[in-house]
Amino acid sequence: MSDTRTRILEAAYRLFCERGIDLTTTREIAHEAECNEITLFRHFGNKETLVREVIEWYVPAQEAPRLTGAISGEDLEADLLALTREIMRFHSERETFFRFVFANIVQHPEHSAFIERIQEPYLLALRELFARYVPPDAGLDLDTIVHDFITPIAMRTFGRVFLGFEQIPEAPFAETHARLIARALTCPGTTGAH
């Protein structure tokens, strides 16, 4: 990636986070990136493409393998705990980004399908984890399990980023979350029990 392209992406990200997408002009982005507006358009075509590329640029594809590296595949609760901690760490490191993405979805619902698409590697990694523990004949939908796993973590991030509160400290939240999901999947009498 060229230095100019990187400068434009970095400038756009900073300004979008500070001012929002709608209030940030391509002229301001070009000025912040120390290039002219024509150069910006040569690299990205239009502001809509720039917004999408900022999001893709900030969520590197190598993050999904990092999540799968947090699991052993041998102990469901331990894996869920490691994964919960890793996702929470990822969210903490990128708090500004999550503020930008959540606000972007609210302001621009047309981007929601795109944002869902860039999450696919993470969701696939989680689906593969649960497939290790849930037998195919269990009658449980892996996508629903992934959703039920990730939603409380995302809501916790949302509360911290937008509302400024953290109702439950990180350690007890992670431990309880992992334990609840593990027990739900292995509870005697359910089709998911081993």
Image: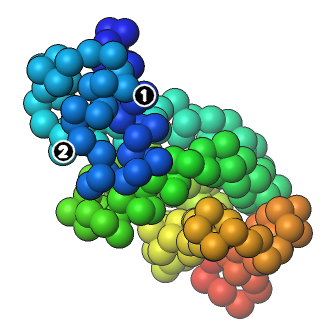
Residue 144 in the image: x percent, y percent?
48, 74
Looking at the picture, tell me which residue is in the foreground, 134 or 51: 51
Give the image location of residue 54, x and y in percent. 35, 37
**Circle number at residue 48:** 2
Quarter of the picture containing the C terminus is bottom right
Where residue 166 sits: x, y (%)? 77, 71
Q: What color scheme is it?
A: rainbow
Q: Is residue 82 visible?
A: yes
Residue at point 18%, 40% (across, down): 47
Q: Residue furthest top?
A: 2
What kind of residue is marked 2?
Answer: Glu
Cα gap from disc 1 to disc 2, whole angstroms: 16 Å
Q: Residues within 10 Å of mark 2 (few under 14, many from 20)?
A: few
Q: Residue at x 66, y 86 (%)?
A: 190
Disc number for residue 93:
none
- Residue 4 is drawn in which quadrant? top left
User: Which residue lies at the image location 37% right of the left edge and 9% below the top edge?
Assistant: 3
In screen coordinates, is 167 left or right of 135? right
Q: Amino acid at mark 1?
A: Glu
